[in-house]
Image (cartoon, helix red, strand yellow):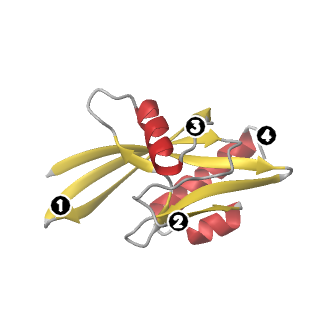
Amino acid sequence: MKKERSAGAVIYRKEGDNIYFLLLWYPAGHWDFPKGNIEPGEKEIDTVKREVYEETGITDLEFIFGFRETIRYFYFRNKEKISKEVIFYLARTNQKDVKISYEHKGYEWLPYEKALERITYDNSKDVLRKAYNYLKSIGEI
């Protein structure tokens, strides 16, 4: 079975006392975080920076180290079963404007509860819950 590794980020920004999370709308119809395949020889964090820039145009990222979550799942591509591992980091930005790539149909900045409702997959919802709780534990929210 083929294996793939990706890295991405739960990206948030603050506006006053409010916090918003960035979600991307993928052509397959689901809502999720920015992420992409780790290239040979590339470090996870470098993948995150590259993919976030390619998919959103965001260059202003402040990583909240201490948060790193991994999800695993299977999917099919051309009738071949693929084992996928995605590592998520947590990052803050002050950059509100997003320029999505051809890989996406749209984006939204949403408060936690609405982001939790919008995310399509349960494993990504779990990542958001953990990120939110981590931000609360460190006094960021």
Amino acid type of the residue that numbered disc 4 sits on in the rendered structure: Gly
Q: Which residue is mark 4?
A: 139
Crowdedness of circle 2 by 10 Å Cα count: few (<14), some, many (20+)?
Answer: some
Residue 22 screen position, x and y as percent: 60, 55
Amino acid type of the residue that numbered disc 2 sits on in the rendered structure: Gly
Query: Mark 1 or mark 2, which is nearer to you?
Result: 2
Distance of mark 3 from mark 4, alpha carbons? 24 Å
- Left or right of 56 in this view: 109: right
Crowdedness of circle 3 by 10 Å Cα count: few (<14), some, many (20+)?
Answer: some
Q: Which mark is residue 59?
A: 3
Mark 4 near mark 1, Cβ–Cβ under 8 Å?
A: no
- Which residue is drawn at the image coordinates 69% and 50% (left, top)? 96
Q: Quadrant of residue 43?
A: top left
Residue 3 screen position, x and y as percent: 21, 47
**Looking at this view, is 99 or 70 the one in front?**
99
Looking at marks 1 and 2 on the same chain, the residue that comes earlier in the sequence is marked by 1
Q: Is residue 69 visible?
A: no
Amino acid type of the residue that numbered disc 1 sits on in the rendered structure: Lys
**Looking at this view, is 83 or 59 the one in front?**
59
Distance of mark 3 from mark 1, alpha carbons? 34 Å
Q: Which mark is residue 106?
A: 2
Distance of mark 1 from mark 2, alpha carbons? 28 Å
- Which residue is drawn at the image coordinates 46% and 39% (left, top)? 48
Question: Which residue is situated farthest in the right direction here?
Answer: 16
Looking at marks 4 and 1 on the same chain, the residue that comes earlier in the sequence is marked by 1
